[in-house]
Amino acid sequence: MIQSMTGYGKSVLQLPTKKISIELKSLNSKNLDLNARMPSMYRAKELELRKLIAKNLVRGKVDFSLYVEITGEDTSSKINKTVVKEYIKQLKDVVDGDTTELLKMAIRLPDAVTTERDDIDEEEWTKISSEINKAITNIIAYRKDEGAILKQDFTNRIATLKHLLEEVITMDPDRIDGVRTRLEKGIADIKEKVDENRFEQELVYYIEKFDITEEKVRLDNHLDYFLKALNSEDSNGKKLGFISQEIGREINTIGSKSNYAPMQKLVVQMKDELEKIKEQLLNVL
């Protein structure tokens, strides 16, 4: 089943003194472009985290966020009382003011608040890792749901291309007859005696030059191959992209060889459908 690269996953963990919120967002990208935001105390786990996300999400522009909200008495920020008192004393020597106002000024000055960096509690990290995996599961589920919508759209557009190809096949005999008629008329307009054998040879040459039998067969095969890849177990947007390029080549060749207005109109419609497929493929994992 194909997956979209657009997705969102979230998980929340409530610990005794803090609430951990984990969010994953992803958009389309040729490769994995991962941006991770987390408190400094968890930075030691960032490489491990990146490997986990890369293994599961594979591609896309991914934003990972880990937020910590302190809900208990535990905090890593402490007021440096000695420094604050000294600041207030110095401020009083400069200006007269209310102690509360001076405290507001002092608390903003350097070293008034210190942050203690704690070592990671491995038991706590095990719980956080479990929630990260839940968020990954959620974003993959979201990607699959989006992928199912894309799959239906691709299936419909390939069906449209097959229908247009059938119309091309149906009108091809009339096109060849038209080529023959135009050549015969051109010869008649010259009003000169023409070697019939030479004329037939030239006629065969031009008809072979405009022949699109191989292109029709290859295009039909490429459309079937696209559907086969679309229904495979793996999501491979790059492979589908390569197949769509081959589809485009055959459509372009049919258009350049057709030399027949009704068929060229069908080719334009086929190109339009294919462009919509290619645009959507940019979002497939």
Image (cartoon, rainbow, N blue to C red):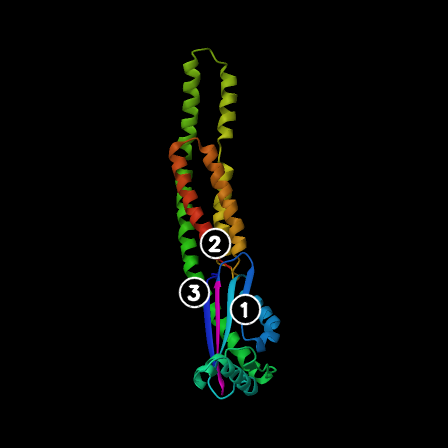
Q: The residue tagged with tag 2: helix, strand or loop?
A: helix
Residue 281: where, in percent of width, then height?
47, 54
Q: Nearer the viewer, residue 20 or 144?
A: 20
Q: The residue tagged with tag 1: helix, strand or loop?
A: strand
Asked if the residue under mark 2 is in contact with the one under mark 1, i.e. CB atoms within 8 Å, the reply is: no
Residue type at mark 1: give it: Ala
- Distance between the Cα atoms at labels 1 and 2? 26 Å
* Between discs 1 and 2, the one toward the N terminus: 1
Q: Residue at x 50, y 48 (%)?
A: 244
Which residue is disc 2 drawn over? 281
Residue 41: name its quadrant. Answer: bottom right
Q: Which mark is residue 145?
A: 3
Residue 60: where, in percent of width, then height?
52, 61
Q: Residues within 10 Å of mark 1 (few under 14, many from 20)?
A: some
Q: Residues within 10 Å of mark 2 (few under 14, many from 20)?
A: many
Residue found at the very far top of the displayed protein: 192
Magenta run includes residue 16 = yes
Q: Residue at x 43, y 13 (%)?
A: 190
Q: Residue at x 52, y 25 (%)?
A: 205
Task: Establish if 271 lies above or below 173.
Answer: below
Task: Establish if 275 lies above or below 210.
Answer: below
Q: Nearer the viewer, residue 130 or 208?
A: 130
Residue type at mark 3: give it: Asp
Q: The residue tagged with tag 3: helix, strand or loop?
A: helix
Task: Establish if 262 lies above or below 192.
Answer: below
Residue 33: where, in percent of width, then height?
55, 61
Q: Residue at x 43, y 58 (%)?
A: 150
Residue 266 seen from this side: yes
Q: Nearer the viewer, residue 187 or 269?
A: 269
Which residue is disc 1 drawn over? 36
- Distance between the Cα atoms at labels 1 and 3? 25 Å
